[in-house]
């Protein structure tokens, strides 16, 4: 017999053995249980060569006039509030993301990943199926998953976290479906934890196996009965954000989510349409022990993906896309607040999702809004939607007697020379400080405001050449 993988978390080993050897294992004094997980791998993929010189980018197709820098990803990114977070200058830098999937064919040569690869942020991790270092093989599913996070072709297709660092792990055996893949999932998660990964995305799920006698039942979805969910629950306790697709069985007789999305602490991600409503195929909850599942939603129907060849794009459906869409959005959000813990980031996102007050087992806590979560984590208060500029000024923070406004990108084209607070008659009261970033969010700060009487005031920005911008302010 030989060892296929081991798990410190579960104090277990997955071994390849015949039936007589497996029976002998049961007699060893330190072995508590032997469980059949499926047949040995019969077909191996040839190992892929190390990535060579990346080919040049061909001519990128032009978009209709007026499209954003996100190109064909504009709509799906905006549903999560990602453009707002990117406008703050946070696009995932410093956040490490492990992607567990069945293969990443062409991810080493596609131009969508040039930035992440040439900057040393795209890493072959390990193939836990075939026990080698080859991950750019077997399937393009992982490539599509990666594309909605890591792509960075400005004006054509930009993902939710183009500046994050990615580790590609192959845990899914594309030749069949067997419980051994759950142990591969655990091995991949332990590997990711061992190197310090911040976020795990797994667009995988297990319910029915080729050997149907091994298939899961609904009672298994309690976060404890299956190997995969027991390991995933431990992964979620290690300070990482662990996201797993909820499943695509919403229209099937099964209809429920799969393993390990049922695990406590794991963020089970369901899919929504472009209007925010649940996609009909998206698997539902609850877990077998009555917990709300899925946890959150993200775009998963008619999602634009890359993964074929050159600059070709396609459309795809599935919670397999919803999960990485959200994983990348969380990476960008977390990169703005690296001092926060995984729990703090998750709490801020859940609190401002669109069903936070009334979660259910169709959409969980709902569709997150990274813009509101970013404001909440930064201490800003807002009475209106972050997407409603109200003249370009939309958020403020009165803590400690200071008053800060956030200025939307593009509202002031030139760097302001000065900013003043004036009373209703136009008399100067305070001079403030301007922190201006072209194309990004800027802030205006006034101090000593704790004794300012209630009333109506004006904020005046001087931008040179006699130009100035005014906005009214009602001070409570």
Image (cartoon, rainbow, N blue to C red):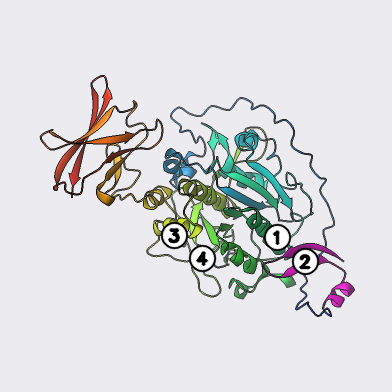
Q: Earlier in the sequence, mark 3 or mark 4?
A: 4
Residue at 37% over, 63% down: 357
Is label 4 in a helix, a strand or a loop? Answer: loop
Residue ID for mark 4? 293
Is label 3 in a helix, a strand or a loop? Answer: helix
* Spot occupied by residue 212 in the image (x, y as percentages of width and height): 73, 69
Distance from Cα at disc 3 to Cα at disc 4? 16 Å
Q: Earlier in the sequence, mark 2 or mark 4?
A: 2
Residue ID for mark 3? 347
Q: Are marks 2 and 3 in contact (CB under 8 Å)?
A: no
Which stretch did the figure color magenta? Answer: 1-25
Label 2 vs label 4, nearer the camera: 2
Distance from Cα at disc 2 to Cα at disc 4? 29 Å
Residue 14 is marked as 2
Is 14 a magenta residue? yes
Distance from Cα at disc 2 to Cα at disc 3? 35 Å
Relative to residue 182, is residue 390 drawn left or right? left
Residue 171 is marked as none
The image quarter in which residue 256 lies: bottom right
Is label 1 in a helix, a strand or a loop? Answer: helix
For disc 3, the neighbor class at 10 Å (few under 14, some 14 to 19, many from 20) is few
Residue at 44% over, 53% down: 368
Distance from Cα at disc 3 to Cα at disc 1? 27 Å
Residue ID for mark 1? 187
Distance from Cα at disc 4 to Cα at disc 1? 24 Å
All told, the count of numbered labels is: 4
Q: Is residue 111 visible to us here?
A: yes
Residue 348 vs 160, above or below: the answer is: below
Q: Are marks 3 and 4 in contact (CB under 8 Å)?
A: no
């Amino acid at each position: 017999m030989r060892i296929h993988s081991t798990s410190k978390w579960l104090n277990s080993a997955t071994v390849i053995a015949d039936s007589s050897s497996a029976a002998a294992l049961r007699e060893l004094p330190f072995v508590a249980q032997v469980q059949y997980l499926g047949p040995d791998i019969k077909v191996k993929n040839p190992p892929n060569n190390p990535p060579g010189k990346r080919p040049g980018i061909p001519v990128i197709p032009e978009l209709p006039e007026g499209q954003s820098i996100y190109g064909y990803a504009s709509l799906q990114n905006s549903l999560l509030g990602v453009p707002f977070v990117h406008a703050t200058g946070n696009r995932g830098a410093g956040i490490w993301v492990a992607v567990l999937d069945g293969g990443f064919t062409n991810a080493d040569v596609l131009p969508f990943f040039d930035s992440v690869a040439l900057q040393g942020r795209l890493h072959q991790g390990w193939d836990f199926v075939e026990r080698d270092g080859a991950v750019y093989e077997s399937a393009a599913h992982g490539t599509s998953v990666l594309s909605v996070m890591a792509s960075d072709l400005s004006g054509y297709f930009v993902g939710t976290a183009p500046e994050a660092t990615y580790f590609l792990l192959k845990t899914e055996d594309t030749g069949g479906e067997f419980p051994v893949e759950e142990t591969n999932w655990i091995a991949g998660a332990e590997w990711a934890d061992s190197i310090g990964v911040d976020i795990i995305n797994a667009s995988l799920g297990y319910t029915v196996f080729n050997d149907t006698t091994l298939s899961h039942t609904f009672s298994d979805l309690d976060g404890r009965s299956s190997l995969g969910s027991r390991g995933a629950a431990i992964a979620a306790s290690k300070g990482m954000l662990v996201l797993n697709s909820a499943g695509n069985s919403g229209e099937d007789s099964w209809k429920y989510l799969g393993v390990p999305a049922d695990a406590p602490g794991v963020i089970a991600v369901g899919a929504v349409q472009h209007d925010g409503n649940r996609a009909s195929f998206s698997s539902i909850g609850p877990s077998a022990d009555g917990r709300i599942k899925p946890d959150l939603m993200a775009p998963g129907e008619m999602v634009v993906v890359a993964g074929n060849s050159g600059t070709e794009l396609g459309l795809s459906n599935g919670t397999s896309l919803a999960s990485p869409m959200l994983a990348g959005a969380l990476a960008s959000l977390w990169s703005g607040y690296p001092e926060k813990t995984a729990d703090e980031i998750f709490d801020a996102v859940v609190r401002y999702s669109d069903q936070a007050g009334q979660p259910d087992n169709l959409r969980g806590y709902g569709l997150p809004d990274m813009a509101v979560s970013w404001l909440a984590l930064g201490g800003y208060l807002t009475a209106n939607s972050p997407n409603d500029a109200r003249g370009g000024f939309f958020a403020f923070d009165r803590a400690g007697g200071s008053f800060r406004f956030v200025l939307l990108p593009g509202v002031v084209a030139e760097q302001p020379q000065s900013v003043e607070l004036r009373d209703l008659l136009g008399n100067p009261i305070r001079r403030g400080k301007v922190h201006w970033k072209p194309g990004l969010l800027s802030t205006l700060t006034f101090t000593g405001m704790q004794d300012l009487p209630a009333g109506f005031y004006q904020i005046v920005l001087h931008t040179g050449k006699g130009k100035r911008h005014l906005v009214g302010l009602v001070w409570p």
